[in-house]
Amino acid sequence: MSNIKPIADLSYRNYDGPLKKPGSRWWVIAKNGIRIALKKKALWFWMFGSAWYYLAMLVGLFFFQQVSSANPPIKQAMQAFLERIVWQDQFLHGFSFGQMAMLIISLMLGSGSIADDNRSNAMLIYLSKPCAKREYLFGKWVGIALPVFVIMVIPTIVFYAYGALTFREYGFLKDAWLLPKMLVIIPIAAMLHASIVVGISSMFNQGRNASATYAGLYFLGYFFTSLMGGIWASSRGETTYPVRHLFYGSIDGILIGVCKAIVGTNGSPPFGIQNPGRMSQVPAPNVAAILGIALLISVVFVLIAWRKIRAVEVIG
Amino acid sequence: MAHEKAPGVLSYARLVTVARISNLTVRYGNFTALDDLSCEIPEGCTGLLGPNGAGKTTLLKTILGFVNPTSGEGTVMDKNIRTDGMAIRQLIGLMPEQDCHIPGMTAVGFVSYAGELSGMPPADALRRAHEVLEYCGLGEARYRNVETYSTGMKQRIKLAQALVHGPKLLLLDEPTNGLDPRGREEMLDLVRSVSHGRGVNVIVSSHLLPDIERVCDRVIVVIKGKLRTAGTIKDLKKLAGQPADVELREPNLAFANLLMEKGLTVAPPKGNVYRVQSELPPEDLLRVVQRTAVESGAQVRGFETAVRTLEEVFLEALTA
């Protein structure tokens, strides 16, 4: 410490300003999580990456609409495309094709959320403040779920607004509940991602280990789902039980299942392709069952985190 | 904060009690970390002394509500440790023993975040973070990532995050751990200045006697989970019968013999220092010593009431 005395009085002064009552610390923790996440440049890249299907559709539709007015053959093709396309399925595709990027975003936001705190003994800091374990966990959870929700919901609303304003006469508003349905599906996806990543993060002392574990779990399930989808498609939809149900036996599958069940579609080819494979058209699961599974998985991982979070290691 | 005194509890009559522990037992499985411990912690700076594994940290963690006591009761600033954990934590600042921080944050971000976690509005927390970082000597390093800090700086930032919300009671667990001599001096200066005349009560848990002696007014000695002794350092260091140490210019046998002839007890000298004991009050004893020195031709260089070192007090408690 320098011997030069500063002009300001730097001696200790007590703080007698306001102190909020316990109960709202979760928002402080969530805000901090979001603030740290927003500093990561890669997050912005994956945000756009997660909306690639919507962006591709928007750009394609806008471009062909502009070109078609001066070019009769393109106008005809555009007309045929617009009559063929199932609008609600475009939201299913936008949602499901974005899930891979949502996994990466979830990992960026959440894999270190509790693991890094475990490594640096930060739990002692959190829990020695008037902050309950439930507030800590909820804050961490919201810090992941809220950005994931926002990242998914913005392109959905933008695409919906564009479609509703431009393609009304082509049946875009056929399902008046489409947007509310999507606004139910997206929080479920955010909940599932946030719960799993929080649960896995709590089991480790290093964020990268948690990332590897969740990514491993996700991709194993993804390959399984793809395999089941392949079997179903190669049987021309003849194979029913259990393949069509096992198709939804992964995190990716569950999310696609939730979307299909709530939107009320079995799916159709992406981009309105005419001669597709049938993998994207596995029949929708039972809505109650798939929602129950999503909720159960979320609860299990949150409970894992709940058991792992403690201020001190008590042996006995 | 007037309290009814629990039986067997050491009490400081004229001081406000900050924490009161009654028959507290904490067990981890078969291991008893605190065994029927009762004590009162008055305002000011109190040292919690004990060897490693004595139960000091467990006591702090129980006060904070991290550990559920098996039996017994306790209050901190009139708040029950079993039921009012949140309210207690709002009044307390903890500087843990372990290296701990929140990853990915600058010092000012970390300390203001700690303030917000304690309930401070964001603007107040940020302003206060700057203040306490300056106070803790981290003013110029406040925008550095905490993970790049040295051990001494990490100790300081732990103190800063504990102080940010203006706690009424500060719990410092081994505050000088891992510090070099200079860092240790500076940390002890900080602790002493915050605990004297600033309205902050401090409990310092340590097994380092010089640290405790330097900053604390009182000590509580805990050994194997039991309270062994408690009191002001001044009182604990006092010897029974209030003997005096008389320092002569050079050893003088006649001086000692004359004192003994006058009915005083004189211990074998250590160098040229004679420990003299009598029933007389200190001022009368001084007069007798002066007269005897004149009679024996001894030259008195010093006279002071003899005390034990804190180490002797601790060792006595340890072997009791």
Image: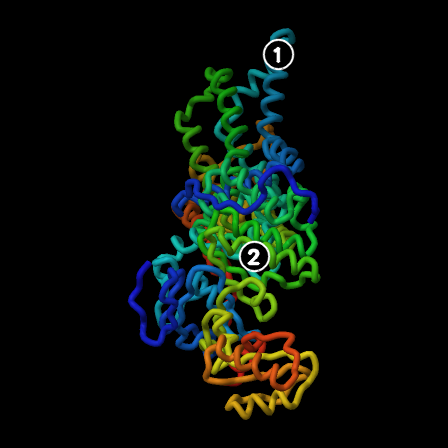
The answer to whether dots 2 and 1 both sit on one chain is no
**Residue nearest the viewer, comparing B295 with A54:** B295
Label 2 vs label 1: CA separation?
Answer: 73 Å
Q: Nearer the viewer, mark 2 or mark 1?
A: 2
| SS at badge 2 | helix
Residue B54, position as x, y percentages in the image: 52, 75
Which class describes the residues within 10 Å of circle 1: few (<14), some (14-19), or many (20+)?
few
Residue A3, position as x, y percentages in the image: 70, 47
Please say if A253 is above or below A176. Answer: below
Residue at 59% across / 50% down in the picture?
B102
Q: Amino acid at mark 1?
A: Gln
Residue A74, position as x, y percentages in the image: 63, 14
Q: Amino acid at mark 2?
A: Val
Quadrant holding the N terminus of chain B: bottom left
Please say if A218 is above or below A67. Answer: below
Residue labelled with disc 2 = B191
Subunit under mark 1: A
